[in-house]
Image (cartoon, coloured by chain):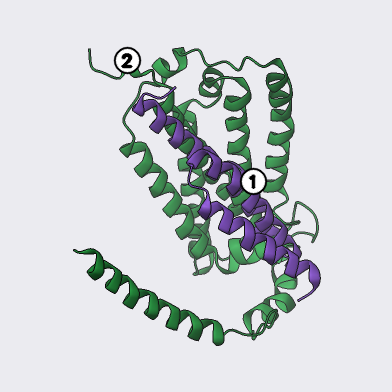
Chain colours: A green, B purple
Amino acid sequence: MTRPARLGLFGVGALGLAALLVRAVGGLHGFGGYPGPYGFVLAQAALGERHAANIVASVVYDYRALDTMGEELILFAAVTGVALLLRQQSPERAARREDAVRSDAVRFFGLGAVGAAALLGLLTIAYGYVTPGGGFQGGVFVAATFALVWAAGSYRLFHHLTPEPLVDLAEGLGAGGFVVIGLVGLIASGSLFENFLPLGTINTLLSGGQIALLNWAAGLEVAAATTLLFAKFLEDVMVPEEEEKPA
Amino acid sequence: MIPLQIVSFALVTITGTAVVLTRDPLRQAVVNGFFGLTLVVLFLVLQAPDVAISAIVVESVAFPLILLVAVANERRREGEP
């Protein structure tokens, strides 16, 4: 295709996009204007119905738990795809490479922060339905803790802390557990993700019924999936070049 | 819109443009960190703490790490130090 033809095609596309954007933005509600009704209904009913102080968690892990299940399975499939596509490296070979951080300050403060980061990540998951947070955010946080071990320590340490069979198992348990909890509701009361646990007391960890279980299942799945993703990418980088060529 | 919201929106616009205008992927990873920070502030100002926490973990951990590893991989293959 010649340059004028390309520019012409771009021009038509850009004009069309601009027209659609102007129309779409023109039709928006005023800033902060919300027409409802679902948000208002939820704000009124969710706390009494689900006993979860963080209504966002009620939506994510109860009212729209089906959507979250879809997201979980998408993440599961995506990470499986990455693991399959990236060349199969030998992690043991990668772990032989000397990559320890030489700066004492980075090692000291970096590895010192690992405990605090892990605790914060777990707290973010645990209190997901009481305060802002939840399985997704906390899960990535926990995975970041392992990444910190690599960044401030060494790949070897990261590799020993995240044995692949265990991470695989955690990922499967998280994704599978989420689906199983939904199915228990289906069997017990005829609809998917119907709550089957006592609702508990608002503002405590024992609240929200099965939201707590789904929250932890999501946390486990996301933490394991993200860790696996990091591990696969790191493996790819850490294997020394000369060893890549088949002998 | 209160002034705090206007400032937050403006910062997102500026840092977002900066990310696009930065051509070197390594520098882009750093600039993107600032973009992520302004996004987090914006979400917080708009009273969406859940989204803000998501933005923190994605913008400050997941995305830069994958990007840096990809850049490291690419440089190694090109034979650069």
Decide: marks 1, 2 in contact (CB < 8 A)? no
Work out whether B23 lies above or below A155.
Answer: below
Front residue (pair A225, B11): B11
Q: Which mark is residue A224?
A: none
* Percent coordinates x, y for residue A218 in the rendering: 56, 50
Left or right for A165, reference A162: left
Indicate the position of residue A185 as horizontal and vertical percent values.
53, 62
In terms of secondary structure, where does tag 1 sit?
helix
The answer to whether residue A8 of the structure is visible from this angle is yes
* Residue denoted by label 2: A243
Which residue does the image show at 48% across and 42% down from the upper left?
Answer: B25
- In the rendering, which numbered label is found on residue A138? 1
Indicate the amino acid at tag 1. Gly
Residue A73, placed above or below residue B4: above
Horizontal placement of A38 versus A236: left or right?
right
* Amino acid type at image mark 2: Glu
Q: Residue furthest left?
A: A1
Q: Residue furthest front?
A: A4
Secondary-structure class at tag 2? helix
Identify the image quadrant of the C terminus of chain A: top left
Q: Chain of mark 2?
A: A
Q: CA distance from mark 1 to mark 2?
A: 37 Å
Q: Position of residue A34 (x, y in %)?
A: 66, 82
Mark closer to the observer (1, 2): 2
Dot 1 surroundings within 10 Å: few (below 14), some, or many (20 or more)? Answer: many
Say above or below: A158 vs A210: above
Quarter containing the N terminus of chain A? bottom left
